[in-house]
Amino acid sequence: MSTTRPGPAPAPADRPRVRALVVDDEPSLVTVVAGYLTREGYAVDTAADGEAALAAARAHPPDIVVLDLMLPGIDGIEVCRQLRTLPTRTSSCSPPAPRRSTS
């Protein structure tokens, strides 16, 4: 027996959707993460490097950012620092928890 989850409720007309920015230089990862967020009702912008991420954040201030730390050009830590200085809707930027070793 399979169970399906209902889709996200549409945002009320007077309230904008939550905007997410997904930043990674691995296209397949961006596609997967952006797909999940879109299905959950987020408005999603993507970027493949730090400079594009900052430009996207200036154009469409995000509510949440999924940010790779090891990016070409400006790394994720510096992107995070610069995002904090922009007049955006993002109130905080935290690096992801370290990956646990399975060995």
Image (cartoon, grey):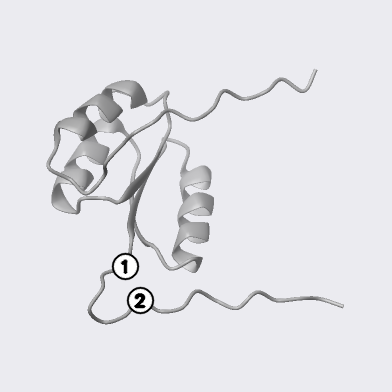
Image location (x, y in percent) of residue 82: 20, 28
Judge from the rendering whether residue 49 lies leftward or rightward of residue 35; answer left or right.
left
Q: Residues within 10 Å of mark 2 (few under 14, many from 20)?
A: few
Please report the residue visible at 50 percent of the width from the left and 51 percent of the height from the top.
Answer: 33
Residue 11: assigned label: 2
In the picture, residue 90 is in which quadrant? top left
In the picture, residue 49 is in which quadrant? top left
Relative to 55, residue 10 above or below: below
Secondary element under disc 2, as helix, strand or loop, is loop
Three-letter code, disc 2: Ala
Image location (x, y in percent) of residue 50: 28, 31
Please report the residue visible at 26 percent of the width from the left and 82 percent of the height from the top.
Answer: 13
Depth order, front residue of 16/101 = 16
Depth order, front residue of 35/81 = 81
Relative to 27, residue 17 above or below: below
Three-letter code, disc 1: Arg
Judge from the rendering whether residue 97 lies leftward or rightward of residue 25; answer left or right.
right
> In whole angstroms, how far apart are the C-alphas of marks 1 and 2?
6 Å
Image location (x, y in percent) of residue 21: 33, 48
Please report the residue visible at 26 percent of the width from the left and 41 percent of the height from the top.
Answer: 91
Q: Could you tell which of marks 1 and 2 lies nearer the N-terminus? A: 2
Secondary element under disc 1, as helix, strand or loop, is loop
- Label count reads 2
Pointers 1 and 2 in contact (C-beta within 8 Å): yes
Relative to 20, residue 98 above or below: above
Q: Which residue is mark 1?
A: 17
Residue 75: tell me if it is visible. no
Please report the residue visible at 50 percent of the width from the left and 74 percent of the height from the top.
Answer: 8
